[in-house]
Image (tube, rainbow, N blue to C red):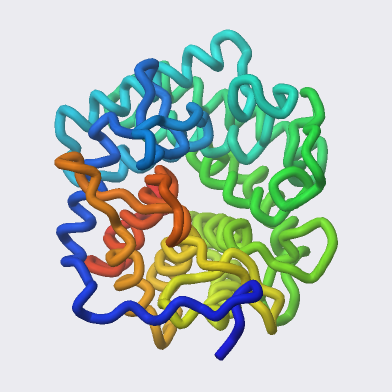
């Protein structure tokens, strides 16, 4: 059996532990609009800690994700629209005073281009849903900033060049480049097609013949979370532009990642080709979405979906949420969104998600 970061992998999920997938999907939708992961000011927070029932920090990138999630719902109800309006207004307030930082009081105020892409896409999509020109215009203005960065740097750098530098060590989120191709979503929604095409080149250049992306600035470890961000960006651009070549690159990367599925059914945090890291729940959601949306035949897709459903936790009467990793006490907001879309496409097929409302 393959070893997982120095220990044996978790056993497979047994059939009698599986929850009804439609029930979990509906519960996820309910939880994300319940206010349990949204601050009083309106921003979506990274997680809710089960042990002390406290929220983590407000997360602008994640708030952008939440707006895309809400914009993609079938027949959103009044509570979901209200949650989206509060989230959008919180982002607009931050941007109106020039605050583009990853989060308040962190990393010397560094501004991450990936965050700007997710914020922009969310504002545009939700603004169009509720017919709010101010939201759409702010999202488009942010996307145009990204397009200018693409032109200046022949792609995107992780940290914007006109802001404070990050004080964090160089890793995929601070110095990597392939994952930034997911920002094509914002560029495409703002009709910045040339910039989106140019941005895709940095993912293509970072992919080897086996399909994997070099997510780290140096080294052979592939972090699967940003690896799938690159897959998602190529899929979105290929879907918008009918590019079969980019689709095949995204499929190759997806097949490579699925070779590292754990016995539990979940996916690991990282892989080297012969060794894998511990299970990470958001990556499992990403892997399922990629396999279904790209029509990649993987032998144990159903066990991955079962694993997500089994790990979903009830949060009182508020619905279901996903944790970040099996031993975590955090009800994680982005893992929950990824899982919601993953279970949705597993039930209803690729039509359940489009590139415009992808989280």
- Is residue 315 positioned above or below 94 on the image? below
Residue 208 image position (x, y, % from top left)? 75, 75
Residue 251 image position (x, y, % from top left)? 54, 75
Say which quadrant the N terminus sits in: bottom right
Q: Give the camera-side residue of 283 and 277.
A: 277
Q: Give the camera-side residue of 10 and 23.
A: 10
Q: Residue furthest right?
A: 218
Inspect this view and state whether residue 18 appears: yes
* 13 left or right of 299 in image: left
Residue 126 image position (x, y, % from top left)? 35, 32
- Is residue 184 positioned above or below 296 on the image? above
Image quadrant where residue 144 sits: top right
- Look at 33% across and 62% down and name the residue there: 311
* 288 left or right of 244 in image: left
Q: Residue furthest bottom?
A: 1
- Look at 33% across and 20% down and name the residue there: 86
Q: Residue furthest top?
A: 97
- Is residue 192 positioned above or below 298 on the image? above
């Amino acid at each position: 059996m393959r070893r997982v970061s120095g220990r044996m992998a978790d056993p497979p999920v047994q059939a009698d532990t599986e929850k009804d997938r439609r029930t979990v999907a509906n519960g996820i939708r309910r939880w994300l609009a319940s206010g349990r992961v949204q601050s009083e000011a309106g921003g979506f927070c990274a997680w809710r800690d089960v042990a002390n029932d406290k929220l983590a920090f407000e997360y602008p990138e994640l708030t952008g994700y939440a707006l895309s999630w809400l914009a993609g719902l079938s027949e959103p109800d009044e509570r979901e629209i209200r949650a989206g309006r509060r989230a959008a207004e919180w982002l607009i307030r931050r941007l109106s005073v020039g605050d583009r930082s990853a989060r308040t009081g962190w990393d010397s105020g560094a501004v991450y281009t990936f965050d700007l892409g997710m914020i922009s896409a969310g504002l545009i999509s939700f603004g169009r849903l509720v017919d709010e020109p101010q939201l759409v215009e702010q999202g488009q203005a942010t996307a145009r900033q990204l397009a200018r960065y693409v032109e200046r740097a022949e792609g995107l750098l992780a940290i914007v060049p006109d802001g404070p530098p990050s004080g964090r060590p160089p890793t995929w989120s601070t110095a990597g480049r392939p994952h930034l191709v997911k920002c094509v979503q914002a560029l495409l929604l703002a009709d910045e097609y040339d910039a989106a095409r140019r941005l895709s080149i940095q993912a293509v250049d970072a992919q080897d013949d086996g399909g994997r992306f070099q997510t780290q600035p140096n080294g052979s470890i592939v972090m699967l979370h940003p690896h799938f961000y690159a897959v998602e960006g190529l899929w979105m651009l290929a879907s918008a532009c009918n590019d079969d070549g980019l689709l095949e690159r995204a499929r190759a990367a997806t097949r490579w990642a699925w070779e590292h599925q754990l016995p539990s059914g979940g996916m690991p945090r990282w892989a080297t080709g012969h060794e894998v890291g511990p299970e990470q729940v958001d990556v499992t959601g990403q892997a399922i979405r990629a396999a279904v949306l790209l029509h990649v035949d993987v032998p144990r897709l159903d066990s991955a979906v079962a694993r997500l459903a089994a790990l979903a936790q009830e949060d009182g009467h508020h619905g279901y949420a996903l944790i970040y990793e099996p031993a975590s006490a955090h009800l994680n907001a982005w893992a929950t969104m990824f899982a919601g879309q993953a279970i949705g496409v597993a039930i209803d097929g690729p039509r359940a998600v489009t590139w415009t409302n992808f989280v």
